[in-house]
Image (cartoon, coloured by chain):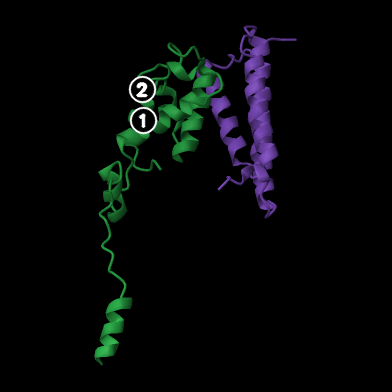
Amino acid sequence: MAASGVAGPTRTEVLQLYRSLLRVARQFSDYNIREYSKRRTIDAFRDNKNLTDPSQLSAAFSDGKAQLEVAKRQALVYSLYAPKVKSIMDIKAS
Amino acid sequence: MAFRAAVLRHIRLPVQTLKPTASRAPSQWSLLRLFSSHDDHLTKEEVIDRVLDVVKSFPKVDPSKVTPDVHFQKDLGLDSLDNVEIVMALEEEFKLEIPDKEADKIDSCNLAIEYIYNHPMAG
């Protein structure tokens, strides 16, 4: 496979992607999806923390960016059809 | 008439004087806040307490090590990903949106407290 010649993600870019994913996760109105997105982001970034191979880094970074796009779209769609009844986990104990 | 007065004298209930409240609210400033609609900014104390609570309840943090000048990565042994998570947790606690450039700079309790205290929208 020919080298693409594009430089891998910088540390700042990775952290920015991490933050964007966590922010989008927050926007989900459904408790389950929100928690899953958060958990999955944290787990995925932690698992790939020690990658050093540039091609692997780029692949993981592009994957993350693609997931970010999916999540943004889904957050929007879910908010259009949000159920009126909130999950019990979202109701603060009074 | 006299009879009526005599009866009333007997059944009239004694007026109770309210004792002055024994202790004023612990912080006089919170009373001030109740009566003023302009000064609803958080006090430094409140900001410090809430920031420390957020940091202490982070699962990877040892609560006994948390002080207002603790550095997330150097003193608490967290990494940059944890740093991002803590800043996100602070955003949620104070209902703020911290832009990426500022969020990158917050890497200790000190900076977090300063930023939040100086933010006009901190809630």
Q: Which residue is mark 2?
A: B68
- Can residue A4 be seen here? The reply is no
Identify the residue shown where x is 51% and y is 18%: B61
Percent across and percent down for residue B33 are 30, 49
Judge left or right: residue A43 versus residue B48.
right
Asked if residue A46 is positioned above or below residue A40 in the image, the reply reads above
Q: Which amino acid does the dot numbered 2 rest on?
A: Pro
Where the N terminus of chain A falls, by quadrant? top right
**Mark nearer the N terminus (1 vs 2):** 1
| Other residues around mark 1 within 10 Å, as few (<14) / some (14–19) / many (≥20) | some
Q: Disc number at residue A30? A: none
From mark 1 to mark 2, how far is it between C-alphas? Answer: 7 Å
Asked if residue A30 is positioned above or below residue B111 in the image, the reply reads below
* Chain B pictured colour: green
Identify the residue shown where x is 38% and y is 20%: B67
Q: Which residue is mark 1?
A: B48
Asked if residue B41 is positioned above or below residue B91 in the image, the reply reads below
Q: Which chain is purple?
A: A
Is the residue under label 2 in contact with that under label 1 (CB below 8 Å)?
yes
Quadrant in the rendering for residue A5: top right
Q: Which amino acid does the dot numbered 1 rest on?
A: Ile
| Other residues around mark 2 within 10 Å, as few (<14) / some (14–19) / many (≥20) | some
